[in-house]
Image (cartoon, grey):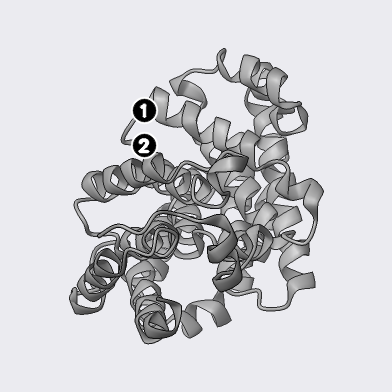
């Protein structure tokens, strides 16, 4: 039987909003940022960039990727220096910095610096792309909503790039309530992306919306049932190949509502799945690691 969400009890047994923001969407968020890099880098370099991106995403050893990625960061900085007004290159640089900050920057101060660099590149990409997208992140909620109504499908790459950078920035600044106050604006941006293209980026905007809608209790704008719909839609769009989606569904929704049966089923499916999939092997390897940790702690949590 479903156990209804009770804010007072659950807050005693799970991290607060800031703590959960630190954890949200790390695997799907970071690796989707990385997977989008090659689309734009290819224009600036050659097909080797796409091969490099594929090699990273198809790798099954996160530590190797962690050790090698800084050289790629410096390459992106060099490309930005050479083409400072190219929205594609700026978005690529932002995406790679976001991925590294979310996955591999264990030191909080370093994660904050890298995520700020990511968001800075993404903000520049918005302005380099079009006047209608310039400065979106600095608008208040009402003005942002009005501006988002003006964007179209041509704006999706820079909108999505900024959304990823924004979420990673908030995650890295989870002790800053000014940053956390931007969560509703980031949510509005993702909802606009979904409205423009329901299946954009293999369903990851749905994944992020599911996570965001479970960060806050219902009294403060959270919506667990809407989150469930987003999680299930993300898994449907991806065909279940992206195992991180099931991990976030279990972590965000099943734990929030104390759905032990759903929690264990999702995570067991992740652990038992074959992690090898084109451009998802690294994501899935990290997802399986997280799934085992969540299963190991389930008895204490529930």
Q: Is residue 78 left or right of residue 195?
A: right
| Residue carrying label 2 | 200
Q: Relative to the observer, which residue lies in front, 158 or 15?
A: 15
Which quadrant would the N terminus be assigned to in this image?
Answer: bottom left
| Residue 134: mark | none
Question: x%, y% of residue 253?
Answer: 40, 56
User: Which residue appears at 39% of the width and 39% of the height?
Assistant: 226
Task: Judge the density around disc 2: few (<14), some (14-19), many (≥20) Cα neighbours within 10 Å.
Answer: some
Q: Indicate whether 51 appears above or below 162.
A: below
Q: Indicate whether 200 appears above or below 129.
A: below
Q: Is residue 155 left or right of residue 166?
A: left
| Residue carrying label 1 | 197
User: Which residue appears at 40% of the width and 54% of the height?
Assistant: 4
Question: x%, y% of residue 10?
Answer: 53, 64
User: Which residue appears at 34% of the width and 47% of the height?
Assistant: 228
Q: Indicate whether 213 appears above or below 171.
A: above
Q: Answer whether residue 86 is visible to the viewer in this image.
A: no
Q: Relative to the observer, which residue lies in front, 90 or 183?
A: 183
1 and 2 marks in contact (CB < 8 Å): yes
Q: Answer whether residue 65 is visible to the viewer in this image.
A: yes
Report how far apart the C-alphas of labels 1 and 2 lie in the structure.
5 Å
Secondary structure beneath dot 2 equals helix
């Amino acid at each position: 039987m479903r156990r209804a969400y009770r804010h007072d009890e659950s807050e005693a047994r799970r991290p607060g909003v800031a703590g959960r923001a630190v954890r949200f969407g790390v695997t799907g968020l970071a690796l989707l940022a990385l997977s989008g890099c090659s689309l734009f880098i290819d224009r600036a370099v050659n097909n080797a960039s796409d091969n490099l991106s594929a090699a990273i995403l198809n790798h099954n050893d996160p530590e190797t990727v962690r050790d090698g990625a800084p050289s790629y960061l410096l390459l992106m900085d060099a490309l930005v220096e050479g083409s400072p007004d190219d929205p594609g290159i700026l978005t690529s640089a932002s995406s790679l910095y976001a991925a590294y900050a979310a996955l591999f920057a264990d030191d909080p101060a370093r994660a904050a610096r890298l995520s700020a660099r990511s968001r800075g590149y993404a903000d520049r990409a918005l302005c380099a792309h079009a006047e209608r997208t310039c400065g979106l992140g600095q608008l208040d909620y009402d003005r942002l909503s009005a501006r988002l109504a003006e964007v179209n499908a041509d704006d999706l790459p820079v909108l999505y790039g900024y959304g990823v950078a924004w979420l990673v920035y908030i995650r890295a600044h989870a002790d800053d309530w000014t940053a956390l106050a931007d969560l509703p604006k980031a949510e509005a941006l993702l909802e606009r992306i979904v409205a423009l293209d329901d299946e954009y980026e293999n369903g990851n905007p749905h994944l992020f919306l599911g996570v965001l809608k479970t960060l806050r209790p219902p009294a403060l704008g959270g919506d667990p049932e809407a989150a469930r719909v987003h999680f299930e839609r993300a898994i449907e769009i991806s065909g279940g190949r992206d195992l991180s989606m099931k991990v976030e569904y279990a972590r965000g929704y099943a734990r929030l509502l104390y759905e032990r049966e759903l929690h264990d089923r999702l995570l067991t499916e992740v652990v038992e799945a074959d992690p090898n999939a084109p451009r998802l092997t690294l994501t899935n390897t990290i997802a399986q690691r997280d799934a085992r940790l969540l299963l190991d702690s389930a008895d204490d949590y529930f």
